Amino acid sequence: MPLVAPSLLAANFLRLEDECKMLNESQADWFHLDIMDGLFVPNISFGPMIVKFVRSTTRKYCDVHMMIIEPWKYFKMFKDAGADNLSIHIEACPDLLKNVEEIKSLGMDAGVAISPDTPIESLEKVLPHIHVVCMMSVYPGFGGQEFIPQTMDRIRQLRNMIDQKGLKVKIEIDGGVTEENAASIVAVGSDVLVAGNTVFKSKDPKATIKHLKDS
Ligand code: DX5
Ligand code: ZN
């Protein structure tokens, strides 16, 4: 069974507390929180203040996806806001290993996010040191985009790499996950499904989450 990580980016922010309550009552495993700065990606979302509000509503795992330049400047702020995991983009971090160690030394899990055009081989060195790879299956920046089909081969490749090294790193797929494609994404070796629009635009979000869990 995959872990399901609804992305709050697609939530109704006027009713954020209700949306969090719904997730708490659902089978969702993680809360996925997308941080965007308008520089690393062409969109701006929210920062640590919202993470802190969300944290106050839930005991579930808060998975923070940092789509920002110079993310290391904000590790402590997100720790204080209550993040359980910080995923930083490989494309944004010239000193990735050092940043991963900084995240862990603050008492959080470390993840590395990878954009669709970045080769999977570039993860080789960091893999033994992290908890999760957040593999983008769309170009980061916006919810509601279509799943890029080439991602399937990239998942297989990463799955092999992780298994060959005997590691426990989770593969998290982020972008364009639907009730239709979820099962095939899990079948090639993913562990965590992020879903924004599929969950929050559903007529019955809890049933949709259950359906994703059963993928
Ligand atoms: C995109 C974000 C995703 C996004 C997914 O840059 O990283 O987490 O919220 O949204 P959906 O599931 O709607 O594609
Ligand atoms: Zn994300």
Image: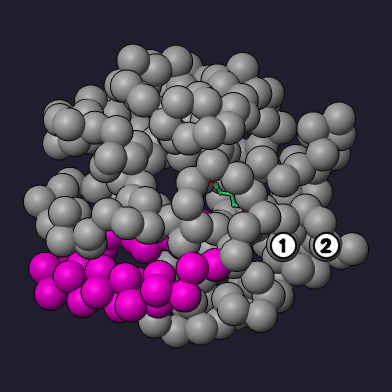
Q: Which residue is mark 1?
A: 198
Q: Is residue 94 visible?
A: yes
Q: Is mark 2 within 8 Å of ligand 1?
A: no
Magenta part of the chain: 147-174
User: Which element is circle 2 on?
Assistant: loop
Q: Dot 2: within a 10 Å radius of its alpha carbon, few (fewer than 14), some, or many (20 or more) residues?
A: few
In the picture, residue 47 is in which quadrant? top right
Q: Is residue 35 visible?
A: no
Residue nearest the observer in this picture, 114 or 58: 114
Measure how far apart labels 2 and 1 are at the Cα level: 6 Å
Residue nearest the observer in this picture, 102 or 12: 12
In the picture, residue 172 is in which quadrant? bottom left
Look at the picture and state if 166 lies above or below 75: below
Name which residue lies at 55% across and 20% down: 48
Q: Which residue is mark 2?
A: 202
Under mark 2, the amino acid is Ser
Position of the C terminus, as image quadrant, is: bottom right
